[in-house]
Image (tube, rainbow, N blue to C red):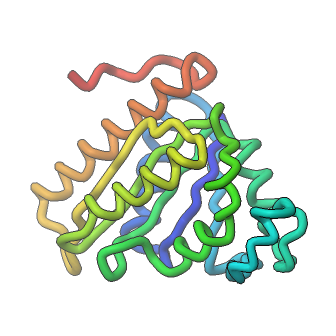
Amino acid sequence: MKFLVIMGSLRKGNTDRAAERIREIHQSYGPVEFEYFWPLEENLGFCRRCFACISQGEEKCPVKDSAPAIEQKMRDADGVIFASPVYGMNVSGPFKVFVDRFAYIFHRPRFFDKKALLLTTTGAVGGGDVLKYLRLVAKIWGFEVAGEAGLITPPGKIPEYRQRENEEICTRAAALFHAALGSRAGKAPVSMM
């Protein structure tokens, strides 16, 4: 199985660790390949809102960057993980640049055969709002949302009870994602009920 993680974090912190935990859980089901796309580190330009992509097709976009290659990576993946920490009660700036750059997909959805897992981390609040936004984007783009993980990761040492809750959330989301991917993903996960 091949997964693409769209990582909206600005650093390798809680969101990156959570994505790595989901990777570990998936590896327990069988061989997996995880590729990370960090919008902040890639050649991804800002949408100019010129509407060329809408009226003439995305190939007419004046921004010449790695967007076509990134879209192909989403197409090639068996599953896509949309991951962003909560910044100012929404997704991070780099993740928003990613969404805006692919705005043409809102008008011409194309990922109807793809599954998505949504992942967010927050110090205290805003996780539900970010999951709602990620769900809206993924669904309009055509993805089937097959798992969600909203983790509370306060600054400093995370209390043990919160670590256990976060582990349960990651395990449940990974199991749902795995099950949605079907028999191509290897052995069936253990029931969470």
Instruction: Locate the C terminus by quadrant.
Output: top left
Residue closer to the observer: 52 or 72: 52
Instruction: Say if 93 sits above or below 151 in the image.
Output: below
Instruction: Say if 162 sits above or below 85 in the image.
Output: above
Q: Is residue 190 left or right of residue 48?
A: left
Q: Residue at x 20, y 56 (%)?
A: 163
Q: Is residue 185 left or right of residue 68?
A: left
Residue closer to the observer: 58 or 46: 58
Q: Is residue 80 left or right of residue 24?
A: right
Instruction: Locate the N terminus by quadrant.
Output: top right
Residue 142 picture location, percent across and down: 59, 41
| Residue lying farthest to the front in this orientation | 55
Residue closer to the observer: 37 or 108: 108
Q: Is residue 11 visible?
A: no
Q: Is residue 93 left or right of residue 1?
A: left
The part of the image, by quadrant, that contains residue 38 is bottom right
Residue 156 picture location, percent across and down: 21, 80
Q: Residue at x 75, y 79 (%)?
A: 50
Residue 65 picture location, percent across and down: 83, 75
Q: Is residue 59 visible?
A: yes
Residue 107 picture location, percent across and down: 66, 54
Q: Residue at x 52, y 43 (%)?
A: 116
Instruction: Say if 89 sits above or below 108 in the image.
Output: below
Q: Residue at x 39, y 31 (%)?
A: 175
**Number of marks in picture:** 0
Instruction: Say if 3 sits above or below 160 in the image.
Output: above
